Image: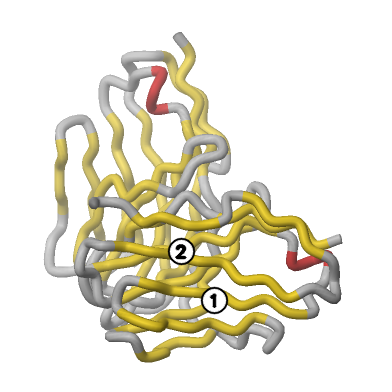
Amino acid sequence: DTEVTQTPKHLVMGMTNKKSLKCEQHMGHRAMYWYKQKAKKPPELMFVYSYEKLSINESVPSRFSPECPNSSLLNLHLHALQPEDSALYLCASSVTGDHGQFFGPGTRLTVL
Amino acid sequence: GENVEQHPSTLSVQEGDSAVIKCTYSDSASNYFPWYKQELGKRPQLIIDIRSNVGEKKDQRIAVTLNKTAKHFSLHITETQPEDSAVYFCAAGGVGAQKLVFGQGTRLTINP
């Protein structure tokens, strides 16, 4: 398996809902990332996990909660989101933090 | 923190001609510079990268040049083809390359 996969592809949620985004890679990469991308804008880094430990949190609001259960899996737990959080959420992975990052297809999130 | 500026924001070239996209960065500690191609509705795809100990790197029709003194780097695409049409993002990363800061993107259109 040479790709990063993400589920679901699309998600619509209300402001009071709790949902989770899932990201998987089976390439043996030890660094995993969450990005947020708004339309016609570049990806913005949210979180970095290195060897299953959170190494970077770009001052993301606590309504976004990342989790790395093992070296292949990365979750993003969502709670009490705002409409302005609607965006494409991209996961990426790299061999280590010192190598090129490979992106998953993203989850398109709509918050009503 | 790091700031990356990318120009032009849009670029239209005739098929077969060359295209050049330029980026400047602000943090002299940045040492990793990847380029991503993102087609409409698709994931960002790493197409080439360069580290600060190298001045130029080529991969078939794509090349990247880096001028550390001036803090700018460029993407060169030769013999452009319609499938090169996409949004291209440059990025700069510091020590460990985990924290990538992206430019605002260039929408490249190849006219047949």
Q: How would you rate the neighbour count of disc 1 (Cα within 10 Å): few for under 14, some for 14-19, many for 20 or more? A: many
The residue to which callout 2 is attached is A91
The correct choice, above or below, for B43 with respect to A83 in the image is above
Which residue is at a point 23% across and 75% down the rendered structure image?
A96
Residue A70 position, x and y percent, is: 33, 81
Q: Residue at x 41, y 70 (%)?
A: B100
**Which chain letter matches label 1?**
A
Of B66 and A53, nearer the camera is A53
Q: Is residue B85 left or right of residue B95?
A: right
Q: Position of residue A23 (x, y in %)?
A: 44, 65
- Residue B11, how many percent across, how many down? 51, 31
The residue singled out by tag 1 in the image is A46
Asked which quadrant contains residue B96, the reply is bottom left
Disc 1 element: strand
Q: Earlier in the sequence, mark 1 or mark 2?
A: 1
Check the residue under mark 2 and report the chain it is in. Answer: A
> Where, quadrant-wise, is the C terminus of chain B in this rendering?
top left
Gap in Å between the C-alphas at discs 1 and 2? 10 Å
